Structures are given as structure tokens and as C-alpha cells.
Image (cartoon, helix red, strand yellow):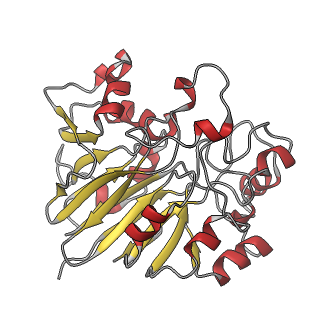
Amino acid sequence: MQQIRAHILGAAAGGGLPQWNCGCDNCRMARAGDIPAQTQSSLAVSANGTDWAILNASPDIRAQLAATPSLHPTGLREMPLRAVLLTNGDIDHVAGLLTLREMQPFTLYATPGIHEVIAANPAFDALNPKVVSRAPLALEQPVELVPGLFATLFSVPGKVPLYMEGGEMDGALQTDLMGEQTVGVELSTGESRAYYIPGCARLDEALRARISGAALVLFDGTLWRDDEMIAAGLGQKTGRRMGHISMSGPAGSIAAFDGLNVGTKVFVHMNNTNPVLRPGAPERAEAEAAGWIIGQDGLELTA
């Protein structure tokens, strides 16, 4: 029986923990070594432990690869990395592609819409198309990502990347988008099913029905509360305006998952302000009491 093997390369949202220009409590504690530092959002997956794919290439990908022995070279230039799959065009999910430019063959999967974003930026031409195949992947079209492990992209409520927004738009309008710009990933070996959804604005009934019965779900844990950034004095946008459902509250993800038949639930993509990043914080205790694992760099999971 083949299992889905998942290795969290980075558990933090864009900016990581500590974020270079932030002096919030979490960042100060991470710099002092009082809480674990975390790199930016990325996940490695495999069905056989030999052939691996990376879901989202964060700006920290070089350090993440170095810290993960299963992704180290097996020869002079032989690598276990076979594919990279993108769930959106956010900078914290695509900037790492520029690190993977050293003429190393792999397949780059994304929706046609996300591929258009990549193609429009000439910096990504550093990924030689003769070496790195760009494979458009339609929604709901399964593909064998690596041997024995199939991936299917599906739309989730979200928004376009910040650099594509243009003028200010109403928060509800921004986060009610369903299409190719923000997707989740269904992973399957035929015997087990898991989901990676690092960005999601709301958990609607269609998404609840889809993930019900999954052995593993790694889900958007950006903020604990919707006004977290505003309350911390670090921004003017709510989590909803940024395209992320909050963990807490009656409309939060913890409540939305309550009653769902999901084996293992893991929060990923935590913003540097999120109190669940502090071991011993009451918010973390509340999430764990509801059956959630707070993701962290290096955490290995099987399903």
C-alpha cells in the first residue's frame, strides 16, 4: 500500500518568521530563539519516498532543500525533485522558481491562468524551457505528479495576487473570486486522499463536501482573527480582504471543520502575527483542543 508522504518545508506565510522588517512579539521571540522560526509556505510530497514534488516554490526554497535530506542530490546533478506545482501566483509561492534555474530538469505544473502570470514576467525565462517543462493543468484534471501520486487542482474562494489587483477594490468582491488564480490540490494514491489548501477565503459547502473523508488536510492558517493585522498596528487590511479565512470565531475555519470526517488536520501558511505560533499560547491550545496540528518547518506526515 502506497502512502502519501508530506514534508512541510515552510509553515509560515509570506515574510516568514521572523519577518525581516517586523518587530511584533512573535518576530522578536523568534529572533531570540524563544519560539521556533519558520520559513515561507511550501510542501514536498511523494508516494515512494524517492521521487518528490514541491507544492509552491517559496523564496526560502534553497534553505528548505538544504534542510531536507530526502531532497538532496543523489549524484553530481541527479535530484529526487521531479515536479513543482503552484497553487497561485503570489510572490511567496513563485519567487523560489528563480532559485531553481540551474539547468535542472523538472516539470512546472500550474493552471493556464497562473502560467500566464509566470510567462508575463521575463525574469522567469531563467527557467530554460528546454530543461524545465511548463505544463498547464486544467481544473479537475488529474495528473500523475510523481510516480504513484496523482494531483488534481480545484478552485477555492480567493483573490488575485496583490501585484495584480490594481486599484482598491471592495473586500467582499476581492475574495469572492472562483477560478484559476487560487486553487487547492487534491493528492491521491488511489488508496489514500489528502488536500493542500494554503490560501482560502471561506469554506463553502462544496469545499466541505469535497474534503470530507480525507486522511489529511493541510489548510490555510494565516490569521487567528480577521482584524489581527489591524489590532497589531501592522496593516489596514482584514484577513478577509487579503483572501484568507481566519481560524477563530463562528465563521472561522475551526468552526467550519467541526463535524467533518477528516483524519489529520494541519494549519499551514501562518502569518508572523498569529498567536498559535507561540507554544503555550491560549489560542494554540484552543486550536489543538479542536483537533488541529500547528504546522512547522520539518514536520513529516503520512496519509
Residue 297 visible (yes or no): no
- 227 horizontally vs 53: left or right: right
Q: Quadrant of residue 125?
A: top left
Q: Residue furthest top?
A: 122
Counting from the top left corner in percent of width and height, residue 230 is at 82, 44
In the rendered structure, the answer to whether residue 163 lies left or right of residue 37 reads left
* 48 relative to 290 in the view: left or right: left
Relative placement, left or right, of 124 versus 107 is: right
**Picture residue at 48% right of the left edge, 65% below the top:** 205
Front residue (pair 148, 127): 148
| Residue situated in front as seen by the camera: 177 or 127 | 177
Picture quadrant where residue 296 is located = bottom right
Residue 286 visible to an observer of this rendering: yes
Residue 119 image point, x, y percent: 31, 22
Q: Quadrant of the N terminus?
A: bottom left
- Give the residue drawn at x 59%, y 44%: 243
Q: Position of residue 196 (x, y in %)?
A: 41, 60
Q: How many marks?
A: 0
Q: Is residue 90 above or below residue 4?
A: above
Say which quadrant the C terminus sits in: bottom left
**Residue shown at the point (21%, 31%) measured from the top left:** 103
Q: Position of residue 73 (x, y in %)?
A: 24, 51
Residue 45, picture quadrant: bottom left
The one nearer the camera, 153 or 37, is 153
Task: Work out whether 88 lies above or below 281.
Answer: above
